[in-house]
Amino acid sequence: MDLSLLKALEREKVLEVLHRDKILRSMEEDRIRRLKVELQDLRRRGAKSISRQYGERTCARCQKPLGRFWNTGAVCLGCSHRICGRCRVFLTRRFWRCTVCHAYREVKVKSGEWFLEERGKKFPHETAQHETIGEKLLKSHQRLGNISIVPPTPPPFQDVAKLSFSRSGNFTSSPLTKSMEDLVMSFNSHIRRISKSQSDLRADLLTVNYDRTISMSKSQSDTAISTAFILNKGPSLSNIFKKFKEWEQQTSKSLSSGALTDRDTSLSSGETRGSNSSIETDADSSGNPSVTGEIEIALAYSFNTSCLEILISACKNIMFGGFKQRKCHPYVKVYLLPDKSSGSKLKTTTKKNTTDPVFKETLQYSVERHLLASRTLHVSVWHSETLKRKFFIGEVLIPLEGWRFEDSSTKSPAWYPLQPKSDGGAVDQVVGLLLVKVKFSNPKHTSDSCSVSHEAGQLTVLVTGVQNMTGSKSGAAFVKGSLTLPGGQILSQRSPVVKKKSNLKWALQLVFSKVTLHELKESVLHLDLWDQATFSLSERLLGTARLQGAPSWQALQQMPSVWHSFSLALCTSINTRKP
Amino acid sequence: MVSHVLTLFSLALSQMASATDSRYGQKESSDQNFDYMFKILIIGNSSVGKTSFLFRYADDSFTPAFVSTVGIDFKVKTIYRNDKRIKLQIWDTAGQERYRTITTAYYRGAMGFILMYDITNEESFNAVQDWSTQIKTYSWDNAQVLLVGNKCDMEDERVVASERGRQLSEHLGFEFFEASAKDNINVKQTFERLVDIICEKMSESLDAADPAVTGAKQGPQLTEQPAAPHQDCAC
């Protein structure tokens, strides 16, 4: 269903109604959420849980002991728990429920859950149908794109004559336009938040959650009522992610044409100031989630010198590469986030051949006390190998907000378990530019591009080098290319290994045969640049570049059999594809 | 800039087109002081008086001029009934066939329906059966419907006898009212009766899912040993 059947004016009218409905619904969702929180509270207070002793001789609600001969309690027919006389709510003179079962029933009434359940009997697969109908319409409107959102109607007036005046004077500052702005704002902030984390992974997780809540709400179980709120939110969230993906595609399009957006440039420049050698190993750690061990840290603030003092005492039981190897040379690196520049970086010395290193080193930041509240201490443990290669072992993030440095008891060392690399740390970074030449050639050598578009030909990709590459300058590299065709078919190619010297011209060739220009228009070419370590067989993903979108392929279509040059942005963690 | 001007222009147009539409209020809708919310849909042929009926009920106002509803609209009214404050979101639908895809989408969310015809319009009465089928198709199984013959103030122009309306409603299993939005006859009663029968359905639905009641009705189980623990309450 869409609104395209309607005339512009009608569409605006309907959209105005839908916006009003949306506001009403979100208020209703808030109310229902509050009801459910209250119910949860009540349940937590009274519930018999695993942690509490399940004594048959106590009331399940108030936990007061029940007697053997009087006040023996009775079993609630709702939940089968033994309930004392006080924790009952009588429906009639004889029939009662326990307080929680009664509250549950009340919530079912007040939230309209009963109706959703009843309706679910007839439409078992479309539980959230009605809730999303407005969303759908609004969405379809956004796709149409050319109609501006109509300002809403002002509050009601009994007097029709006054109406038109108040209306025209009112509409610019009306609450609805504002709410649309809010919508857009929150959408933007969502995007910002997502792009900071490992974007696609996050998106997938959330959509999975959403699916699960749907299936849960089908069962009429207790949990369904508490998840119904998420259910309603679900579609709009997934919409946001959908839009985010579109947006991401647009950015990558603009990146491929060589123009870096502000966000990406600031990221890449920020990283060049940082530790190059550690970034290099970021990709490594993501494939190795098994992090063990602990680190002992003490924090103190010297008010005399205005210094934050971090005592890195020791680590124990650390591992790297999934093995507790003797050949582990650990050191500890500290940042005072959000500053990730080299100015914020402090390191301990490197200990040799140990998985239980003792450092007893104090690192100092000269920083005003009041500024610490907004900072987070990022402590990471690394293995330093020969030839300056570093491997991530584990990390700890210690938010300093609310840290009571004035209290001397906080100065004593504490053990922190090491964590795998956090999402927030691994930003979708542009690590450089991949220079490629692409050519589409047709065996029949026809020059007429129209007839060519449906004939199978061959796509040749020539990787000629990298530019502005942060990361290692030595070693060897190769490129893995995969071409995803519209039908979902993926053609993969791997180039030979080439010595990775920044100024050297490469000629890594990948050939995808039996593709048509027609298919290419909707295809995505992924180029993964891999690093092959000099003294090991391990391979690391340095970055992924993408070529996609009509403008890119159009050039090939217009001039087949000619090399077209592209500078593609190499990104790390652009998605979660495995090596 | 151009689009902005267009918006202004179209807004002015829509004002001219319908002076009444903007009276759908926001004050009522932001009121949070209620126990629960019912959604009600008013359906029926074009020009039978659905919008007037709603305006009479929600605003106690009446405009004789006919303005065709575009797609859908709604109003909110909070009433006090059976010791509960019930917020009603009353959806007013366009009777015209061309909006059918939009209006039928809202059947699914409605707990109750007011199916309206015009007692001075035979065609609108003949369409009641079709509307009823629409409800059966798109709404939940226990959808509560009230059949309303509107414009009962226009006795001179009546073509549908009260008795025919009553018979049809019995045939369809609906309750029946003749009403007039213009003279404010049976408007409030219609909505209140609909709210009552939705409440009845709600109780039935809850009791059916509640072992404390079903168990009680079965009698012998009203001892200290009930049936297996019920999943509805994971205490």
Image: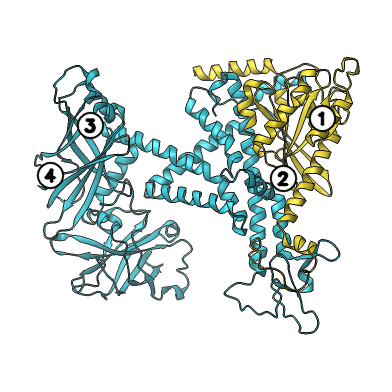
Chain colours: A cyan, B yellow
How many other residues sit within 10 Å of disc 4, few (<14), some (14-19) or many (≥20)? some
Pointer 3 residue = A515
Residue type at mark 2: give it. Answer: Gln
Residue B46 position (above or below residue A118): above
Nearest the eye: A452 or A531: A452
Q: Secondary structure at mark 4?
A: loop
Say few, some or many: other residues with alpha carbon within 10 Å of mark 2 (under 14 / 14 to 19 / 20 or more).
few
Kindly tell me whether residue B95 is visible in this rendering.
Answer: yes
Q: Amino acid at mark 3?
A: Val
Quarter of the image where one finds residue A68:
bottom right
Vertical arrangement, residue A66 with respect to residue A19, above or below:
below
Q: Which sits in the foreground, A218 or B15?
A: A218
Q: CA distance from mark 4 to mark 3?
A: 32 Å
Across and down, in percent, residue A114 comes to: 69, 50
User: Which residue in the protein does label 1 denote?
Assistant: B168
> A297 or A12, which lies in front?
A12
Q: Which of labels 1 and 3 is toward the front? A: 1
Q: Is residue A15 left or right of residue B188?
A: left
Of circles 4 and 3, the one toward us is 3
Instruction: Residue at the far bottom: name it.
Output: A68
Which one is in front in this view, the residue at disc 2 or the one at disc 3?
3
Disc 4 to disc 1, how far (Cα)? 86 Å
Disc 3 secondary structure class:
strand
Residue bearing the label numbered 4: A502
Residue A347 location (% of width, % of height): 26, 64
Where residue B32 is drawn, which disc sits there? 2
Task: State which tag comes first along the sequence, 1 or 2.
Answer: 2
